[in-house]
Structure formats: structure tokens, C-alpha cells
Image (spheres, helix red, strand yellow):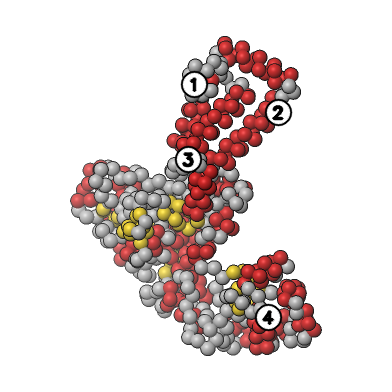
Amino acid sequence: LAFNPNTRVGFSAMSFAVARVLVGRGCQCVGFGLRRIAIAPTGPLAGMRVLDLSRILAGPSATMLLGDMGAEVIKVERPKIGDDTRRYAPPYIQQKKGDDSDIAAYFTSCNRNKRSIAVNFTNPAGRDIIKQILRESDVLIENFKTGTLDKYGLGYEQLKEEFPKLIYCSITGFGHTGPYKDRPAYDLLIQAMGGSMSITGAPNGEPMKMGLSMFDLTAGLHGVIGILAALHDRETTGLGQHVDISMLDVSVALLQNQGMNYLATQERQARMGNSHPNVVPYQAMPSKNGHFILTASNDAQFERFCKVAGRMDLLQDARFNTMKARVMNRSVVTPVLNDITKMNTTSWWLEKLEASGVGCAPILHPDEVFVDPHVLSRGMLIEMNMSGCEEPVLCIGSPMKFSRTKVNYRLPPPRLGAHTEEVLLSNGYNATDFQTLRDSGIIDCMSPTPTSEVPRQLVLARPGARTQELHERYERLGLSVHQRVHVLMMIFIACLHLLRVDSLNQPEARRKGVRIRALDHQRGLRMQQRIHVLALVLAVCLHLLRVPLDAPKQQEACRMGPPLLAGGLHGYAN
């Protein structure tokens, strides 16, 4: 009907025209397999501006979290050099399969949703740029060694009179007070000095660091918490303040129950490997083909474990039947339980224990984590288009899930100075000022591409594994993208015919429409029933084509969609 111009059906020509326009708009705005730009922030911090003078990991991880939640983040970097982590490589992001780009994976991990400006603020003109941007900023965050920014007139005490509402967050190794305040710090140093390294590792082995940069990341989290608390206070007082975050303070605070174990007894705790000082069993257990985690954290769970293991006799043994007894008799209990768990495979234990409500888990490698169906359903694996890369780059999603004010991924990690011109021209500088500053080396910006046009940095947030699986499914069905578009158009036209959507005032359409509606009435098809049919058919179309939603609705669709299809923030309706 749609493609045959000679077909004498009154609604066909205009209905097809409407369908073509609507499908065309869909392709342009959200696309069938096309990439979508998320323009406006949708998170709860939309409208807040953060000036980011931080680098490496602690500060950038904090500002990325603020950016994900909607804040405008302007990252200030040294001209020609940039953030140190731009050189923390390999590994690099691949620009195409088997071919490295010049973008470090480390830098990519903590710098999305930011605009980069290259400014030398050791020069007075560069400091003026910082202050000009601060006039419209809510937060400044930095992680230089204590006193560094004071030398350039950018310390908190030097700025607070001119910017009384400014929230100024410093994240340093040892804070801005105390005998260690001038020391440099790295995560490993803090792990050693904060006590966590002494209690980590095998009982008879050497002290062991954690596999993550734990105190860089948790110092960044505490920085975000402090910033949000200071912003709340500003709503009442109208005044900003200095938020002073010390990585060592954070590491001591996170000792929590382990630290209290010492304070309660004044006795050093020996390293316990994967065991828990207060609960048994709460550790890695051997199986017939590997290891798994068992957390029988109360007596009821331990009883259920014994039932699964077929060892209810253990509950009659005074060394096993209470939590206190199991901890006191750890040297007896642990070997007995190890012998029990070695009798079956990891998958057997996980299936039986989970069904019985006993805490257990597989021990996954990152490659297994990023294909886990729950991880995908929560939107923790996304793709972002990056300048210089032919294919979308897999990235880790945000853990922040809001029911109304969704996080969104607006900008990929920026090239050095990619937004210098844009930011300066929107903050009181004109083109002549910009060129003068650039010629003098005070600022720098990303050079144009050979085509003299900087590629648009598109953002696509969706799970790569699920996307590939869907494409493979459609290939097995023999349905190409174009064929799916054609199917949608034909079904949509049929829907228009069913509901008589004819706004053309065509006499023939009206005449035939009245006749068909009368026939429908005779057959018992009321308008409400036809709407129900339309809704069902449209649902099939959405499932077939995965029609992307606009940015504010992406996460809600994924959150409410079935786990098999919902891959997190990927922009496809289920």
C-alpha cells in the first residue's frame, strides 16, 4: 500500500507521508542503531558549576561523580602537558581493533562529563582566567600539595573574601593541618600508614596492599559528601566554606569495626587472609573445581548450610553450634568446613546455597563481571564515542540511580584543551583576548582536525555485549536494519488505517473511513478495542526495532524493562 502510488486507498499517500516523517524524525533524533547526543544534564546537580583544578585520581573521581549527577565541570589542565594520567599507559583505548589510540585507559576511567581548558595559572593572566570563571562557579576542587595554590593567590584564605559563597574542597594526603601536612602522598603510602595494609594478606605472609586505589577513591567520595553538605549549609547561611579532606583521615575512619576491635582490646590483630575476625565461616571456601565465597553470618544461616551439606550432626557439636563457639574454635571449624566444601563443584554450592538463603558468591574476574546479567541490567557497562576512535569505547557506568533526576553521559573524556575557546568566550573573553592569550602561551586549545572541523563528541550509553547479541540475533533472523525499518513503517501504516488517522480532509479518505468505521462497528470493534490493538502492535514494533527513547527516559525504560533485554542506560525501549 505504502510503496504503490497507484493503490486506490484514500489514506495511503498521506498516511505513508506521515509515517515517513515520523520514522525519519526518529532516525535523526534517536535513530535505529544511530548514536544519540545527550545534550542537557538531567541529574540532581544540574545548574551547579564546578571548577576542577585536580588531577590523577582522588579529585577527578570526585568531579566525575558530580558531573554524572548533572554538574557542569570545567577541568583546568596545564598547557601542552595536561593531567598526569594522560600518560599513565599502557593500556590505551583502542582507536580500532588491534590499534592503540593516544588516550590512556586510566585517564578515561575518571574524566567523563567534563570540559577541558588548558590554562597556565602560574601566570597572572592565567590566574585572572581562573577568577573570571569562579564568578559563576559554586565549587572549586583541588588536590595539590598543601600550600601550592597559596603561592599563586588561589588558596582558600586568599579567595574567600572575593568569593564568599564558594565551596572550596581540598583533597590531600594528610590535610591542611598537622605535622605531616606538607608531605606528598600516594594511595600505597596511605594504605601503609592508615593501618589497612597491616591487616591485609595471608596470616604468615607479608603485608598486602588492596588491588584498588582504595583511599584515592574513597577520599574522592568523602570530598563529594563534604561538598554536598557545604552546599546545603550555604542554602541557610549564604556562605561557602573550606572542605578539607585528608586521605589518611579517610583511611583511619574506614578501619571502622577493625579499628574498634583493637581499641576494645588494645591488642594487635593478626592478618587473617580472607577470613573475618568476628564471623566463621565468612571467607573463601575451596570447592572441587575452584573457590567460592561463603558468608554464613548468623546461626540460622549456618544451620541452613549444614542442611545443604548434609551435616546436621555439626549442630550437636559445641564447637560449631553458636557464632561465638565457631570464632573461638576457628582452627578446628575451618578445616572441617573446607573438607566439606571440597566435595562438590562451585556451581553446585552456589545453586544449593542460594536456594536455601545462605550468603554465597562466585569469585569473578573483570571479564566475567562485565558480562554478568545483573551488572548489565544496572547499566554499569556503557559505550561512549570518543574523538579519534572508530568504534564506541566501553566504559564503566555510574552507580548513582535516581528515580526522577537520572544521571546521563553528556561528554566523553575530553582531549587536552578541547573546550578552552568555548569556555573563555562564554565567560567574558572575546576572540581578540583569546588569540592574545593563546599567542602568549597562557592558554592552549586542541588543534583542529585535518578537515578543519573538530569531530562532534557523541555519546552513546548502552551495554556493548547486549548490543552485539541483539545484532547477532537479528542476523540469524535475516533482518537487517533497513528491513526492520521497513517492517515498522508497514505496521505503522496498518495502525493508521485501523485507527483512521487521516488529518488531510481528503474526501475519499473520509468517505472510506466512515464506511470502514461502520463496518468495524458491525463487527464489534469499538474505538477502545482498536486502541488496544494499536498498543499491542506498537509494543511489537518497539521490541523488534528497539526504538531509542530520548535521554531523560533512557534509564527509566531500562530500570523497568525485563532483565533479559534491559542492559542499563543504553537508550533502548524494551
- Circles 4 and 3: CB distance less than 8 Å? no
Residue 350 is left or right of residue 40, and the answer is: right
> Which residue is rendered at x = 56% and y = 29% of the image?
492
Label 4 or label 1, whichever lies nearer to me, is 1
Local SS, label 1: loop
Amino acid beneath label 4: Ile
Local crowd at mark 1 within 10 Å, few (<14), some, or many (≥20)? Answer: few
Which x, y percent locates residue 456? Answer: 36, 44
Label 1 or label 2, whichever lies nearer to me, is 1
Mark-to-mark CA distance, 1 and 2? 29 Å
User: Considering only order in the chain, which callout, 2 or 1, is on the residue closer to the N terminus?
Assistant: 1
For residue 306, above or below residue 479:
below
User: Considering only order in the chain, which callout, 3 or 2, is on the residue closer to the N terminus?
Assistant: 3
Amino acid beneath label 1: Asn
User: Considering only order in the chain, which callout, 1 or 4, is on the residue closer to the N terminus?
Assistant: 1
Disc 1 target residue:
4
Amino acid beneath label 3: Ser
Residue 26 visible to an observer of this rendering: yes
Local crowd at mark 4 within 10 Å, few (<14), some, or many (≥20)? Answer: some
Q: Can you tell which mark lies on residue 340? A: 4
Label 2 or label 4, whichever lies nearer to me, is 4
Disc 2 target residue:
529
Which x, y percent locates residue 29? Answer: 46, 37
Residue 557 is left or right of residue 63, and the answer is: right
Residue 260 visible to an observer of this rendering: no
Disc 3 target residue:
480
Which x, y percent locates residue 349? Answer: 66, 71
Q: Can you tell which mark lies on residue 221? A: none
Local SS, label 2: helix
Mark-to-mark CA distance, 4 and 3? 53 Å
- Circles 1 and 2: CB distance less than 8 Å? no
User: Considering only order in the chain, which callout, 3 or 4, is on the residue closer to the N terminus?
Assistant: 4
